[in-house]
Amino acid sequence: MGISGTTSYARDEPLSLLESSVCRLMTFVVCAAVVHMPGAEAGEPTIVRHDEEGDGVAQIIVTAERRSADVQAVPLSVSVLTAEDLRSRTLRNSVDLAASVPGLQFDRQGIGAAPFIRGVGTVSGAVGNESPIALYVDGVYFPTPNASIFALEGVRQIEVLKGPQGTLFGRNATGGVIQVQTRDPEMEPSAELGLQYGSYSRKQASAYVTGGIGASVAASMSLYGSDQNRGWGENLETQQPAFRSQEIGGRGKLSWEPTPQTRVRLTASYLRRSGEDGLGYHIVPGSLGVDGRTRYSGFYNSWADPQDNAAFRHTVLSARVEQELPAFNLVSITAWQNMRGFFLLDQDMTPARIVAAPISQYGRTITQELQALSSPAAPMAWILGAYYLNDVAAYDPLSLQGAAALPFESVQIHSRLRTESAAVFGQTSVPLTSRTKLTAGIRYTQDERRVAGKTVGLVNEANTSLSAARQEADWGKPTWRVALSSEVNRDVMAYVSWDRGFKSGLFNLLTYASASVNPEVLDAYQAGLKSEWLERRWRVNVSGFVYQYRNIQVEEIVAGAVLSMNAAAARMKGADIEIDYAPSRFLSVQAAVALLQGRYTDFKDAPINIPTRNGAGALLGGNTVVPGDAAGFQTVRSPKRTVTLNARYTHPTQRGEVGLNAAYYRNSGFAWDPDNRLRQRAYDLVSVSIDWTSPDEKRVVRAAATNLNDAEVCVYASATALGDLCSPRAPRALSIEWSMTL
């Protein structure tokens, strides 16, 4: 598929036959549900569970409102993936989640993540730049974009909350929250082993063990490691394989319950990752490198010299204390994180020595959150909380080498950003009638950022000071949520909401002397319907939204730097439709369509990248950046339509159970940059798997194929002053895995 370059809006891609069929089916189901909606029944809403035969869609318990509740009773748009979903769909890391979550776009930028939900996100994976999509793992906020890319080993459930989330979560989130819950220790001893082998000589091993220590303590340990020592591409200049990778990680948990009312959980995790994913840029077809010679030479090949490479380490220590009191419950979450990253980037993507950047990153984060929650028996649910964040992000240093550093051998940027944030928040749900509930929440955030940096030029180990600066700024902002929900009957709930989100202003660590970028503000107006039908064999959830987005923080890549700026405003609108169908315990089907229209309503002086040409019109290489008006242009990473379809069938036999799984994802394409010239074309992803589970359910063998149709898709692309670049996603891969429970 690849990407395309245009100078005007790209025409919508036509629906594929499968996509069109799915859309028609989902439209019919939703319309039928509305037309045949039964009348309201008296009584309090109840949670319907599986019958004894296990027929019907599974009940899903989420903590989207910081307390356990049926997902169908929460007045939010939430998509949920269970551990079984992750295994059967062969979702190996967080980047793979987009193929199963409607409205989620999960790309990479360098060694960092760039997630978008409903067109809201940031293209920057730079250290110190928090994403509008907040990631929480076991209640701990991960501020660095690098930590948002992780393996899904040991994960129990993932919840994707769409829209601003400010009144319940410690850190503000303009676009949404990805909440990851990992497995907790159990008193009953058990152990699990797993082995996997796949294409490109990819090998992985995992182990999990848990058990009780005495009467009140349980512990668990999860370990995994992977090694792909064959690349799926080649560096044509160095003649070395490209896109090899290694990863190792572990998580230990200790759970102590000294009394029935007190629970303490201590967690330590470590992740080390290295490879070329998100880097390994190639010049896109039809473009010319800034050296005037380098062209496209294969989707998985590059000409970079030095060859791109990255390494990353992330350590997290956390403590969660829960205390039940007669009138309410208390929760404390304390965490310390340390991140170190290094990557070597040939930014010009050519054999010429123009812009080579060895970059060292550092991050340290301390967070403390306190919550007071109403008891489950209270007639009115409420939560009060306070949150504190102390964060340091730094380039230590970022070096520029090659022609961009002349007359020096190299130019080094040493910069450090310190952030202190304090917030108080609260939310309550008030019953207005036996069926109707009003939810109201408010939060106030005060952020203070201080940046300091210096730039030096080096020649023969002698350095020359080129610049230095120090500045600070602070921002305070209230945010809120108001939602009205009504139980139409036991199986149908409707809601409307108004949420305001706020993303703090920031300083760019590369251009530390530049003025700060203003905070983002997003007003989200949403309406939704959650329903279950035909004795819970059908689940149909629909949500529609309109976003008013102001002071959008955008990035522009130039030689040796990433510049930050504010786009004036944008408007997004769309809808999500999710359907689960489970006629029996042997067959389940999930289908979803996400519709989105995002346009900049005001964006003067937007960066417009025009291929550089001579007087005769021939390409010279690279792009010339000029200011222009992007009002009316499509917002970045905003596909107008995505479709997901997953089906699983299991067949029991005397020798075990056989399972078949097929997953399909369709993306209608989107613009990578505000000028809309460089676009990702529409693409499809198909994955299949077959597995066997032993009669005692202790052994599982699975064979799988991901990206079966071998689609060529960019995980990151951008038009820059140095040329049009693309970093490829993985091609088709086959694998076989074995796991055993002891």
Image (cartoon, rainbow, N blue to C red):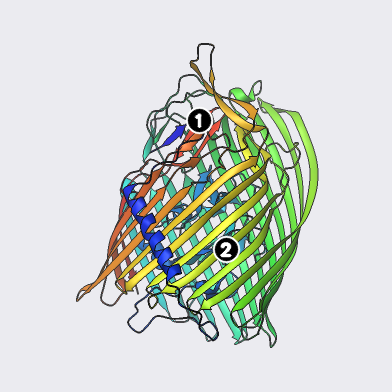
Q: Mark 2 points at which residue?
A: 527
Is residue 458 toward the left or the right of residue 492 in the image? right
Task: Residue 21: give x, y in percent of width and height.
Answer: 34, 54
Examine the rendered structure and indicate whether residue 270 appears above or below residue 540. above
Which mark is on residue 641? none
Is residue 731 toward the left or the right of residue 173 in the image? left
Q: Is mark 1 on a helix, strand or loop?
A: strand
In front: 628, or 493?
493
Task: Residue 580: give x, y in percent of width and height.
Answer: 40, 67
Q: How crowded is mark 2: few (under 14 residues within 10 Å), some or many (20 or more)?
A: many
Q: How crowded is mark 1: few (under 14 residues within 10 Å), some or many (20 or more)?
A: many
Q: Mark 1 points at which residue?
A: 724
Is residue 334 toward the left or the right of residue 160 in the image? right
Amino acid identity at mark 2: Ala
Nearer the observer: mark 2 or 1; the answer is: 2
Res 134 seen here: no
User: Which residue appears at 36% of the width and 51% of the height?
Assistant: 19
Task: Residue 518: give x, y in percent of width and height.
Answer: 73, 45
Which quarter of the image is occupied by the C terminus? bottom left
Res 57 seen here: yes
Which quarter of the image is occupied by the N terminus? top left
Q: Is mark 2 on a helix, strand or loop?
A: strand
